[in-house]
Image (tube, grey):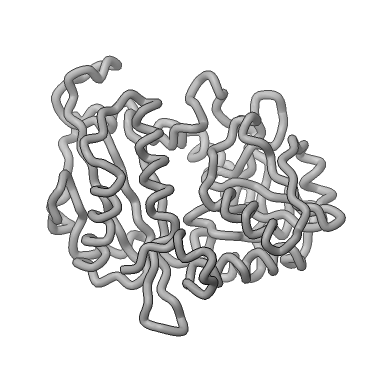
Amino acid sequence: MAGINEAKYIWKNGELVPWAEATTHVLSHSLHYGSGVFEGIRCYKDPDSDSSYVFRLRDHMERLHRSCKIAMIDLPYSVDELCDATVELLRANELPAAYIRPLVYRGYGVMGVDPTGSSVDVIIAAWSWDSYLGEGALDNGVAVGVSSWRQRSINAIPPAVKSTASYMNSILAKLEAKAHGYEEAIMLNEAGLVCEGTGENLFVVRDGVLSTPPLSDGLLEGITRDTILCLADDLEIPAIEESLTRTDLYIADEVFMSGSAAELTPIGSVDGREIGKPGEVTRALQERFFDVVYGHIDEYKDWLTEI
């Protein structure tokens, strides 16, 4: 995976700070105990104009607030303030298209599992980042494997909180997948049902019906996932939420992953079982998705924040 393309500034605790100066202490609580929450957001530049839009910015910042509530972190900025800070940062960095990473973390001041008394730091970073799963992934699909690592239990780390701690098993699953020659991993939940990728939600298509696991099976309530369900309704594609087994992936007509970073990435094979090239439903949803994020569909302009 490519390194980070550095920008000029990072927004930190209410100020634009030069990129290299946006540092934190090595004894910050979140560095040791994973007590941080974050978001992943994209800004898109319309290829047919000079317009740039952040996609579903407010929805992401509202989810960040929900994550903080679950994690009992006192977030000192409102949704409006975080949205305004994002726009300020993108303009200062002169980034017409970018990946955006807000992060709320417990900083320096206390050590030990109990975070009481630690400071709370808030940053927003943005940089240029193309295809998350590699060049050609959106067009050709990727090979994935079902991981031996299970997704975290609902009653261990709640899937509704997008926390830094949640991603340790994602890291393990990702490294395992790479070691086996796959681009990405799929994790099952404790009951053995399909849950999600290491940083993506999952969809399958069989006989023209779009299916995705329900939130009750332990997956993150993805904003791109919600987007796809809305777009499927627009396109009159039957869509249901239902529990899936790994064999449902093997015999699907189409499979794809969704996420702010991954966008709509088709899956070409699962555990060596060929799915094939991106299918008709995947292509239709991809086309509709990019029309929306580029500002080409008026009914979805409320999802866009213009830069």
- Which residue is at 45% across, 67% downward? 130
The residue nearer to you, when weighing 14 against 218, is 14
Figure check: 243 above or below 125: above
The residue nearer to you, when weighing 236 against 138, is 236
Horizontal relation, residue 234 to residue 300: left or right = right
- Which residue is at 74% across, 45% downward? 240
Figure check: 99 above or below 45: above
Horizontal relation, residue 67 to residue 270: left or right = left
Mark yes or no: residue 84 visible.
Answer: yes
Q: In the rendered image, which quarter contains the C terminus?
A: bottom left
Which x, y percent locates residue 206? 83, 53
The residue nearer to you, when weighing 254 against 174, is 254
Which x, y percent locates residue 119? 17, 29
- Count the numbered circles shown: 0
Figure check: 151 above or below 269: above
Horizontal relation, residue 224 to residue 161: left or right = right
- Which residue is at 25% across, 55% downward? 84
Q: Residue furthest right?
A: 207
Horizontal relation, residue 292 to residue 271: left or right = left
Answer with the quarter of the image where residue 72 lies. top left
Q: Residue furthest front?
A: 299
Q: In the rendered image, which quarter contains the N terminus?
A: bottom left
The residue nearer to you, when weighing 247 against 60, is 60
Answer with the quarter of the image where residue 99 lies. bottom left
Mark yes or no: residue 1 visible.
Answer: no
- Which residue is at 35% across, 37% downward? 65
Which x, y percent locates residue 132? 49, 59
Which x, y percent locates residue 299? 54, 66
Figure check: 278 above or below 243: below
